[in-house]
Image: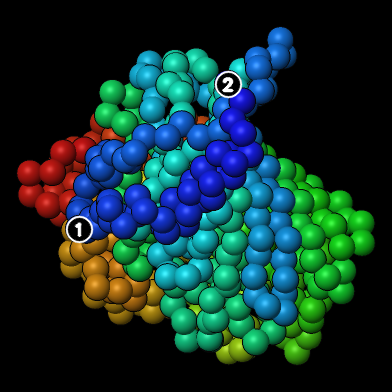
Amino acid sequence: MKLKPSVWLPLLLWLVACSTGQGESAAQTPLPTRALTAAPTATRPPRWTPTVSGVPAATATPFPFVTAPPDGIPQVTLSIVLNYADKRMRVSQQVVFANNSPDVWDEVVFTAPSAHQPGVFTLHTVTVTTTRQSQLAMAVLSGTMLYVRTPMPIMPGAALAVALKYEIAIPPVSLDTWLPLGNLGAGERLIQAGDWHPTLVPYRPGAGWQTWDYAPVGDPNIYGIADYDVTLRADPTLVVAAPGVAAYKGQVRHFRLERARTFAFLVSPEYQVLRGMAGSIPVRVYYLPEYGAAAQAVLQTATQAIPLYTELYGPYPYTGLVIAQNAYYGAMEYSGLVSMSSNAYVSYKETPVAALVNLTAHEIAHQWWYGAVGNDQVHEPWLDESLAKYSELLFYERYYPDFVEWWWRHHIYSRKSNGPLDATIYDFADTPAYIDQVYAQGARFLGDLRALMGDPAFFAFVKAYRQANDGRIATRNDFFAAVRAHTDADLTPLVERYFGVGSKE
């Protein structure tokens, strides 16, 4: 049955109101609040009432509306219109994927990290498309979890596409803003867009979608991989620092980035660019004009670190690397891109002990430990941060051995790091406390593990761990399985020291 315009339009407006948190049903069924927990949950918010299936599509066509990605990797298309002056983005996003579980889905769940700040993320519409139909869908935003009710059951093996239309109001940041609050933000001279767009949360067969509560500590997200096709429309005078294969035409920039955890970018009318090669990997460093010497140090560090980590960990996972000066205190890794602390540029002095050199070596290591090998950064943040922090030591051992003792003293022994290594982000009041424990304890643990195993076995384990978990979300069990495959040493005292008495590998 085809709805008359007089019926269709009010229904559409009602659905849009529901998706933005307004309208009658929102008043009757308030958004659920969730207490912080130290374990992932798969609970759903209350069912929506009344149940409305949305606007029916036209009659079925012999051609499918959507097909599953051939390699099983979700395909994400982002169309972004950036108003730099107003610090706003208007976004159309589509995610094409398949139900690769044995379960029937009646909802799909995204994390929308930008929604943790009120007024930043505004959802307008959600559309769910299957092989034979396309309908508007209901959505509930609870914290940073976006629950999309599918108007039809999604059977095992079935393909679907979820299209989201939304706006982002980019919040202001300053040079003393800590991560993760500053990952998405507008400074006086640039915009940084990290952890901003919705991504699918992991799905666990038989258990459901893995959800969690946002806490402003560390990296409060869990990301799978996807292939990104991104179109960015903005003033052509702006310089865009973004990863992937790029093409430019006037105000339109196009990027393709494969096997990425998210898509991040930075923009400034003032950026200048340094280019270099790290072996076969092109590197671009974006910086504000007065920081040319610091940018040279970043480029040199990148050309040293990438070949070293390739030797130790296996191939670099992307086609290039972009490192861009940001507008806040933190530095943050993204797939193929590093958002580098502006404070480190400001304080840079020409010495290997400069924070900028150390941070660059650390964030580049995350291209392997976060980018290639993912992990649950909410509940097991030690998995990537331990390896990234210890990579700093390996960098100094190779290129600046006279500063190894300084690195241990300044970066590890000076920090308060007596707690268990397997803490969650919910165990810390703020990011500095999280860094003190997780990073420093992680480096101590890996140093002791290396001493116990010996260098040949240790580095064989690290490379095998990367290879076995490339493109996955690795766990503690995966980590110790790789360790056990390369040593017969008794790990019990080491595990009990860093993870608590009674802890198992």
Q: Is residue 287 left or right of residue 236?
A: left
- Observer-nearest of 304 and 207: 207
Residue occupying image coordinates x 39% and y 48%: 140
Up the image or down, 90 lies above or below 271; here it is above
At x 66%, y 23%, the residue is: 58
Name the image quarter holding residue 154.
top left
Q: Is residue 182 visible?
A: yes
Q: Earlier in the sequence, mark 1 or mark 2?
A: 2
Residue 455 position, x and y percent, is 42, 45
Q: Which mark is residue 1?
A: 2
**Badge 1 is on which residue?**
35
Residue 321 at least partly seen: no
Q: Which mark is residue 82?
A: none
In the displayed structure image, the side of residue 192 where residue 497 appears, left or right: left
Mark 2: secondary structure: loop
Look at label 2 and name its amino acid: Met
Please provide percent x and percent y for residue 56.
Answer: 57, 27
Identity of the residue furthest to the left in this view? 502
Q: In terms of image quadrants, where is residue 6?
A: top right
Above or below, 450 against 273 in this view is above
Rendered-image quadrant of the C terminus? top left
Horizontal arrangement in the rendering, residue 443 relative to residue 80 (left or right): left
What's the residue type where badge 1 is placed? Ala
User: Mark 2, residues whose alpha carbon is within 10 Å: few (<14), some, or many (≥20)?
Assistant: few
Taking 280 as reference, is 437 above or below it?
A: below
